[in-house]
Image (tube, coloured by chain):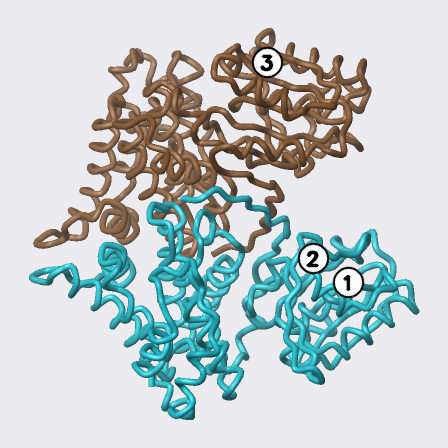
Chain colours: A brown, B cyan
Amino acid sequence: MNNFTFHNPVKVHFGKGKVEKISKEVKDYKKILLVYGTSSIKDFGIYNQVIELLEGKEVYELSGIRPNAKVDKVYEGIELCKENDIDFVLAVGGGSVIDSAKAIALAAKTNHDFWDYFFLKGNKPSELIDLGTVLTVSCNGSELDATCVITNPKTKQKRYYNDPTLFPKFSVIDPTYSFTVPKTQIISQSIDVISHILEEYFSKPTYTTTTDYLSEALLKSVIKNVEISLADSKNYQARANLSWAGSLAVSGLISLGKEGDWTSHKIEDALSAHFDIPHGLGLSAIHPNYLKYIYKDHIEKFKHFALEVFQVNPVAKSDEEIALEGIERLQDFFEELGAPIRLRDLKVDEESLEKISKDIELNQASYSKLESYDIFQILKSSY
Amino acid sequence: MNNFTFHNPVKVHFGKGKVEKISKEVKDYKKILLVYGTSSIKDFGIYNQVIELLEGKEVYELSGIRPNAKVDKVYEGIELCKENDIDFVLAVGGGSVIDSAKAIALAAKTNHDFWDYFFLKGNKPSELIDLGTVLTVSCNGSELDATCVITNPKTKQKRYYNDPTLFPKFSVIDPTYSFTVPKTQIISQSIDVISHILEEYFSKPTYTTTTDYLSEALLKSVIKNVEISLADSKNYQARANLSWAGSLAVSGLISLGKEGDWTSHKIEDALSAHFDIPHGLGLSAIHPNYLKYIYKDHIEKFKHFALEVFQVNPVAKSDEEIALEGIERLQDFFEELGAPIRLRDLKVDEESLEKISKDIELNQASYSKLESYDIFQILKSSY
């Protein structure tokens, strides 16, 4: 267990109808910039509800945020803040909406170009606008972290900025808002959550029982509740438990004392840069095959995973067989959800795998020591 | 899963040597009141280390805080703050030191009697002094919560005050500081942590998988690591994982979406008011017997507990047998630690049990519906 610092000051209002809390949360602010994406929040009544709750405030709007938050909308939001002397930014949406709102809040009190902050480490403004979020679609955890990821389509740059000043003051998580999310999105999102947890769980150092047991707890809750949520899209309890497990998985809790691996994410990011693959589905094809490639270096840990997370029956099996069966059960689970477990099913071109394997910057702290050759083998076995 | 609000803004610096962080944490403050207990922090070198790290600050001291934080030391601390225009209170110690420091920070900027705040709900000062903690002995979670408990020996009142303004700005948790804590204290403390978790775990409502699985994770980590810590008092990894599990158990995380039961704590509090019993040891005698009294109302949950937390072998056993075996394993575990599992071993007078059972205010939201008669039966079965 390594030393760590943990700090997550976001106030979470969780549950059906909890959006009502925003009135009290914004009571000391006067001019609010409401940031949202498409018209779906209007279709589902969330927009009207929020507008009612902001009664008495001067509300300005920035809509039309698209997936993969882009620089142009951030510039537009910063301009709106400056022109109207905005003192609070309220994001209502998923990851790209919250990330855009964070970038706006970051730079709206300075005359610097916001994009510069994304390039120099330690470069930060002296004053930010306060920020709150209402999560409508489970995302990359932006509602509970201090990071935003913004894309500049012209320069083809996707950069992230992280600083404690970016934590939202509050986040509202109402699981009923996700009842209408398409199944494929729930599947992709849940696999991403599982993959996030595994990147920390299967990483150095060895003795991290408290954090690892918490990871197993979240894995089991996601696995149980995503199945129920897919079968019964309006099952509130399953959705609520899935949603809370997903948020906690990215709150920082499960990385405490760990080094993190992130090899599967690095491979998937490189693939996504070449092919148009939903992140979670790429991970579905990569992550179990990556684990199959390295598990023999860490039999004890993989055996523990198999027994705890998938209740593999150990009778008459060697430790190595138990360990492998755990990974196979994970892969089977992704397949049962309806996710592709082979890159060939994602229209990835087999010829490009060797080149992609060479593009990947290896993580020196990864769980097993790997070379480009190994990455190529992992990609081939995932094809 | 009930709706909830979760907010824990304490910045935790965890690990060996992390006390060095206090220099940076107090850089914007000038006059610091250092609050501590007995001379033990001097014996173990912590005092000198802290004084060195506060170089350049005007440091005032309030020492001699005893177990069960008393009003007199709080008044003394408030006076010191006012006389010297203190702008930061730093607690170095366990629960009573941190609780005293909180009460001082609470009232040092007002002319109200601090004790009044403990009697009127919603009664709070407009300004507090900022507060940080360096934990030396695992305690009741005061390093991670917004509560303080103070005792007035003259009026025999023990009251608690809770308000979000009381969260420490930071808490340093260095597991090596607890290497010298006597075994009996580690045992009592660990049973208290387990009991805290069980009070939430075995409570309404039914469908709370995410929170319950996290509770199981913490229970398993405490059980594993307390045994190693008792056998090998300088095993850093075991102590660190035990310590972090203990802090998380009181951080609020495992009560999210739950109603909480707290019947065992109510019974133990009533016993402690009559007999001089260490809290954790009283719980060791009460909690398993309480669970044995109610488990038939909740067979599924108790079966899950038995299988997950104690890996009870289910072969050829009924659900009821599996459920009961889980509780027996818990009781055996307390006994193996060396804790008394009978009230008779705690010098409790059997004649007084009926009277005590009538003194206990029943919790209407408890997991099973109970009457005074039931409490008497639980006390008798614990004798």
Where residue A145 sits: x, y (%)?
57, 36
**Chain letter of the residue beneath label 1 in the structure image:** B
The one nearer the camera, B101 or A154, is B101
**Chain letter of the residue beneath label 3 in the structure image:** A
Where residue A249 sits: x, y (%)?
44, 40
Image height of A121 relative to B358, above or below: above
For the residue marked with disc 1, what is the amino acid? Ala
Where residue B164 sits: x, y (%)?
67, 52
Q: Which residue is mark 1?
A: B105
Q: Which residue is mark 2?
A: B166
Q: For marks 3 and 2, give the one nearer the viewer.
A: 2
The one nearer the camera, B336 or A296, is B336
Q: Which residue is mark 3?
A: A70
**Residue A140 in view:** yes
Mark 3 Cα shell of 10 Å, populated few (<14), some (14-19), many (≥20): many
Tags 2 and 1 touching, CB below 8 Å = yes
Quadrant where the image shows the C terminus of chain A: top left
Could you give the CA–CA distance between mark 3 and mark 1, rounded to whole angstroms? 46 Å
**Chain letter of the residue beneath label 2 in the structure image:** B
Point out the tag, 2 or 1, that comes first from the N-terminus. 1
**Residue A383 in view:** no
Q: Secondary structure at mark 1?
A: helix
Q: Secondary structure at mark 3?
A: loop
Left or right, residue B282 beside residue B99: left
Image height of B221 relative to B337, above or below: above
Q: Residue at x 85, y 60 (%)?
A: B109
Left or right, residue B286 beside residue B245: left
